Amino acid sequence: MPNMSLKKNEMPSQDPNIRNKNFLEVALGYTEEQALDEAARCLNCKNHPCVGGCPVNVKIPEFIKKINEHDFEGAYQVIHETSSLPAVCGRVCPQESQCEKYCVRGIKGEPVGIGRLERFVADWHNEHSTEQPARPASNGHKVAIIGSGPAGLTCAGDLAKKGYEVTVFEALHLAGGVLVYGIPEFRLPKSIVQKEVDGLKAMGVKVETNMVIGRVCSIDELMEEYGFEAVFIGSGAGLPMFMHIPGENLKGVYSANEFLTRINLMKAYRADSDTPIMDLHGKKVAVVGGGNVAMDAARCSKRLGADVYVVYRRGMEELPARKEEVEHAIEEGIIFKTLNNPVQINGDSEDRVASMTCIEMELGEPDASGRRRPVEKPGSEFDLSVDAVIMSLGTSPNPLIKSTTQGLEVNKKGGIIVNEDGLTSREGVYAGGDAVTGAATVILAMGAGKLAAKSIDEYLMSK
Amino acid sequence: MYRIVRKEALKPTVILYEIEAPMIAKKAEPGQFIILRVDELGERIPITIHDFDREKGTVTIIVQTIGATTEKLSHKQEGDCLQDFVGPLGKPTETEGKKKVCVVGGGVGCAIAYPVLKKFHDCGAEVHAVVGFKNKDLVILEDKFRAVSSVLKICTDDGSYGQKGLVTQALQELLDEGNVYDEIFAIGPMIMMKFVSKTTAPYGIPTTVSMSPIMIDGTGMCGGCRLTVGGETKFACVDGPDFDGHQVDWDLAVKRNQMYSEFERRKYEETCNLFKKEAE
Ligand SMILES: Cc1cc2nc3c(=O)[nH]c(=O)nc-3n(C[C@H](O)[C@H](O)[C@H](O)COP(=O)(O)OP(=O)(O)OC[C@H]3O[C@@H](n4cnc5c(N)ncnc54)[C@H](O)[C@@H]3O)c2cc1C
Ligand SMILES: Cc1cc2nc3c(=O)[nH]c(=O)nc-3n(C[C@H](O)[C@H](O)[C@H](O)COP(=O)(O)OP(=O)(O)OC[C@H]3O[C@@H](n4cnc5c(N)ncnc54)[C@H](O)[C@@H]3O)c2cc1C
Ligand code: SF4
Ligand code: SF4
Ligand code: FES
């Protein structure tokens, strides 16, 4: 008998007023009991619309059925057939616009908590499985992966399973891409990412950190001098955008990337870290933007002791962030100043941020993307007194790889151009993830890494 | 890991390290820098490449001990390893096609100025050099400078060596003597580079400065190193570190570098205390 409750099992979480002062994980995960109760809400629909909403087509009803049967490891294996990072995606996928959006239970009531179940299964596996990833026999072919974000890690894993000798080159000192430098610990514990990286290493994947490809060595050199027969570019979209308004270079104006990198990668929130971050106790911070990045920057600021405003030019309904992150941010006491846009940042005599001038907005006609375009209300400028401003306006692909690789074509926005197999304009060079699409999602990057691994295998096997 | 194969204290607080980093040595060019981390939880700090040996596979840096991280580094010995060492970063200095140049270095900036100066020399330019230090005890690399420059002016703030006064005065003298340069290249404390740029502006001599804002990743990802140059925002780690000194917004750059002074002072004290305790 399915569980006909209209509501999802609630996610056990740390109390908002406690968690907004620590960096421990916010959502604690379902207990076995809750997972079983939630799994019983799935109707195991024959045409399973949920699967079509998942970018990598996780066999959702099948894995949920395994949970119903108390076969948690079996459930993990089903998910793992199509997704390599379930513990990550269960936590960070925008489920409300993907799998859960199409769940029939969502027509009347709340959809099945697919993401929460996925997380439960992955965590169960990580806790109980003792199985060591086997090291496959080498097929003698060398492939280079540039970037260790979800795209690169997935591509590396799939190729390693097939026996390729894979080397991942990462510019930073730690592997994981946005998963380690961007997304905060309280949303995605770094030990989960580390486990994925360790798993790859156990399969024989070499991870070379501190390697900025394009500077220390070009793609051409990787192929000609170092004997890599194919290359996958998963270098992400790391270049932060600014608004180009007056005052943006004052002391106390950060890009979200800088702010989050200091906190997540460099652990600046810990007393034993040598990396500084502004002391935000009792200070006011404005975060400009409304995506996941903005929510992360806002919630980190809150945890560092600040009063935080999110300044976003559209309305609450239009916030592009995951729904759960917005809810969590509100619970944690973050103040949303939607329908406002900054026009200028004002400094004190020491060039420190003192306030930000904003203008009120209203929503006009829908634009090309179908979203209603925000327009300024003339004469509505006002000053918001703040001590720091964090620009979370989005990112674009870093031009370094393009500018150092002969014949690699990119589009107007700097994204690498690929065909349906993930192949770039250069033979043997594949690309995927944010480096191709611009800032997108973990699951899409992972899917692109999978596709490229398949194409690289076909290419090298037919050569 | 990145092994220290040679360590040499040029002065008690100015230390040369030769580091094993074959791939970086193979690619390094004058004007570029590396980023290092001394240990786990360590800060990433940028340091200019002073020299490199492509055959031996080593990169030499000269570091002034001024804060927590450089203090920690100074306690590493030959044979020890650094946690991280990444590069070469930034754009190489353009040294081609110049007939006569003047390189101005200040303090430990002279260590950075040297490879640029040498490259100008090797490219066939006539090189004048003006180097400044606080006092006689801090003068470094004098012989190396002399070997590659036809005019060398050494200045000290207190007159204990060379001529007394600031590098800008010595530079002014060279200009007054009628020297015409294709380019002036200044490396040192921001305040020095600012005044060198001020000095050369009336003469319209192209003046390149090597900027050193606070950096983290060094790849263009964080935007923390941004400067206002000619009214535009530039990322020093990828667009620089060399910029047109007449276009830089100096006051803002100087202030941005003091962003963390309080934290830095505290960390430095903590670190020094830690080493003192260990020594006891
Ligand atoms: C703060 C933040 C929060 C986010 N929250 C979510 C979320 O909740 N849900 C979600 O689905 N998505 C989220 N995203 C988006 C998601 O993280 C990205 O879409 C995804 O990480 C892209 O993966 P990728 O592998 O393409 O690139 P990245 O994760 O960006 O990894 C690229 C890697 O390549 C390295 N690299 C770059 N250039 C070079 C080079 N020249 N040589 C060597 N290495 C190089 C980089 O250092 C980096 O490690 C968030 C992003 C941010 C910034
Ligand atoms: C491109 C570049 C090249 C450099 N080359 C050299 C060099 O060849 N030799 C040398 O001795 N120094 C060089 N520096 C400066 C060097 O990075 C700083 O001295 C070092 O970071 C100080 O660290 P600390 O923890 O010991 O001192 P702190 O107490 O942390 O800082 C002292 C001062 O150093 C500067 N600084 C601090 N952190 C950074 C950072 N992450 N990035 C840049 N500057 C910072 C600030 O002005 C600060 O006030 C260079 C800087 C840049 C940006
Ligand atoms: S991978 Fe993401 S979209 Fe797919 S089922 Fe899991 S949570 Fe849903
Ligand atoms: S649509 Fe919902 S109820 Fe139906 S199979 Fe998918 S998850 Fe289960
Ligand atoms: S140091 Fe991060 S962008 Fe330059």
Image: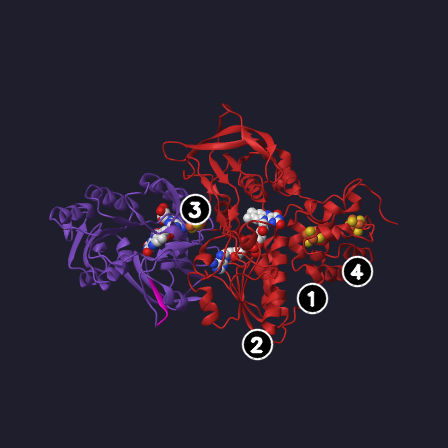
Q: Amino acid at mark 1?
A: Thr
Label 2 CB, ligand 1: below 8 Å?
no
Q: Is residue B48 magenta?
A: no
The span from disc 4 to disc 1 (Cα, nearest Å) is: 16 Å
The span from disc 4 to disc 2 (Cα, nearest Å) is: 37 Å
Q: Is residue A280 left or right of residue B72?
A: right
Q: Nearer the viewer, mark 1 or mark 2?
A: 2
Q: Earlier in the sequence, mark 1 or mark 2?
A: 1
Specify the segment rendered in magenta.
Answer: B56-60
**Chain B tint in image:** purple
The secondary element bearing badge 1 is classed as loop
Q: Amino acid at mark 3?
A: Gly
The majority secondary structure of the magenta stretch comes to strand
Q: Earlier in the sequence, mark 4 or mark 2?
A: 4
Local crowd at mark 4 within 10 Å, few (<14), some, or many (≥20)? some
Label 3 CB, ligand 5: below 8 Å?
yes
Q: Residue at x 84, y 46 (%)?
A: A3
Q: Report the residue marked by disc 4.
A: A71
Q: Nearer the viewer, mark 4 or mark 2?
A: 2
Residue B224: assigned label: 3
Q: Are marks 4 and 1 on the same chain?
A: yes
Q: Report the residue marked by disc 1.
A: A130
Q: Report the residue marked by disc 2.
A: A140
Q: Amino acid at mark 4?
A: Asp
Q: Position of residue B21 (x, y in %)?
A: 40, 67
Q: Is residue A298 above or below residue A46?
A: above
Residue A118: assigned label: none
The span from disc 1 to disc 2 (Cα, nearest Å) is: 29 Å
Q: Nearer the viewer, mark 3 or mark 2?
A: 2
Chain to which mark 2 belongs:
A
